[in-house]
Amino acid sequence: MCDYSLESFARRDARTGDQLMTAKIGGYGSVGLVAADAPETAVCLCPDTRLIVSGIPALLQKSWNVGEVAIATFQQRDEIGMWRRGGYHRDGVRFDGADQRFVLFQEFPAGIEVSVETVPEAPRNAVPEMTRPELIPA
């Protein structure tokens, strides 16, 4: 959920409707998401969370091939991709559009607004095998 670089900070899971912004968290300079009312708490996203990213600066719009406002999906790159591109960060977004560009949160400047549109639900049938009544010995 949260990039491992944010594991040692106070954090909470994102909720649908959250209005967040990018910020440097802690003394290490890792970029993460925070709510305006709790800037000391990192907000963690689940893979496939749908976002609206707004306030994207003009230079990044051109580089990322997006407008000032863009729809994106939170993703974590795999370990192979991590080492190929360098660095240890894995959290980012894949912008909707023709090229489906993936951008690490570390590439975001502080102050970009992020609205959480949908958070995927955990599967309802994810019941551990031993708790199913038909599997418990009589």
Image (cartoon, rainbow, N blue to C red):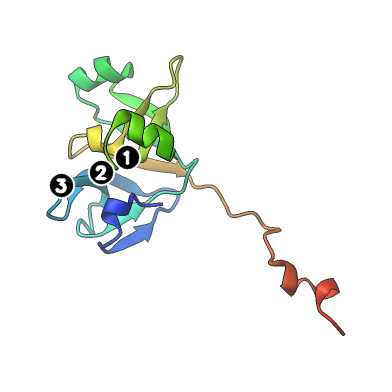
Q: Is residue 132 left or right of residue 26?
A: right
Q: Quadrant for the C terminus, please.
A: bottom right
Q: Amino acid at mark 1?
A: Val
Within 10 Å of disc 2 (Cα), the crowding (few <14, some 14-19, many 20+) is many
Task: Name the residue that disc number 3 marks.
Answer: 29
Pointer 3 with pointer 2, Cβ within 8 A:
no
> Whole-Å distance between the Cαs marked 3 and 1?
19 Å
Task: Name the residue that disc number 1 marks.
Answer: 114
Q: Residue at x 26, y 62 (%)?
A: 8
Q: Position of residue 26 (x, y in %)?
A: 16, 55
Q: Amino acid at mark 2?
A: Met
Q: Earlier in the sequence, mark 3 or mark 2?
A: 2
Give SS at disc 2.
Answer: strand
Q: Position of residue 101 (x, y in %)?
A: 39, 22
Q: Residue at x 30, y 46 (%)?
A: 20
Give SS at disc 1.
Answer: strand
Q: Position of residue 126 (x, y in %)?
A: 67, 60
Inspect this view and state whether residue 77 appears.
no
Task: Name the residue that disc number 2 marks.
Answer: 21
Q: Is residue 135 left or right of residue 27?
A: right
Give SS at disc 3.
Answer: loop
Q: Amino acid at mark 3?
A: Gly
Q: Residue at x 35, y 29 (%)?
A: 84
